[in-house]
Amino acid sequence: MGRESFEDDPRSGRPATATIDCVHPIVMDDERLTINQIANAISICRKNFENILHKELGLTKISVQWVSCLLTSDQKWTRLIISRENLALFGRGSAGFLEHFPKPG
């Protein structure tokens, strides 16, 4: 016959929280690792790994570094002020404007 219960059957493998706890230190330890490299290292599919990064940990990759997607109001305000200051410097044609920024590589 059919099932007698609506409860989930026990599942094999690690619980989701164990996988999430495993991902965070790996990502923070070496920002140069790619999504595929980490997903393969912990034996989960790329899509599940991306969900953990973005939905569970709130991270996104910018350049070669993983950073939190969530900024506080103070951080947003600071970012706005610095951006305006940089635009003003650039608009005045300040000598050495680009020297204030880190070089890639």
Image (spheres, rainbow, N blue to C red):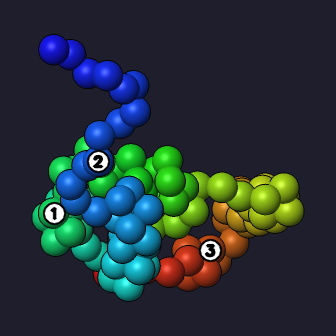
Dot 3 lies on which element? Answer: helix
Question: For this rendering, which residue is in front, 82 or 28?
Answer: 28
Residue 90 rendering spot, x and y as whole percentages? 67, 62
For residue 22, what is the image quadrant?
bottom left
Q: Is residue 43 visible?
A: yes
Q: Amino acid at mark 1?
A: Ser
Residue at 29 percent across and 76 percent down: it is 32
For the C terminus, the quadrant is bottom left
Query: Can you identify the residue that label 3 sits on?
Result: 97
Q: Residues within 10 Å of mark 1 (few under 14, many from 20)?
A: few
Which residue is at a point 35% across and 36% down the rendered structure image? Answer: 8
Q: Label 2: state its secondary structure.
A: loop
SS at circle 1: loop
Q: Position of residue 33 (x, y in %)?
A: 25, 73
Residue closer to the observer: 89 or 47: 47
Q: Residue at x 78, y 59 (%)?
A: 72
Q: Is residue 79 left or right of residue 56?
A: right
- Crowdedness of circle 3 by 10 Å Cα count: few (<14), some, many (20+)? few
Where does the image place residue 10, in percent across and percent down from the top left? Answer: 29, 48
Q: Quadrant of residue 78 in the image?
A: bottom right
Mark 3 vs 2: CB contact within 8 A: no
Work out whether 104 lies above or below 93: below
User: Which residue is more in the foreground, 88 or 2?
Assistant: 2
Q: Is residue 3 left or right of residue 26?
A: left
Q: Residue tagged by mark 2?
A: 10
Sequence order check, earlier mark of 1 and 3: 1
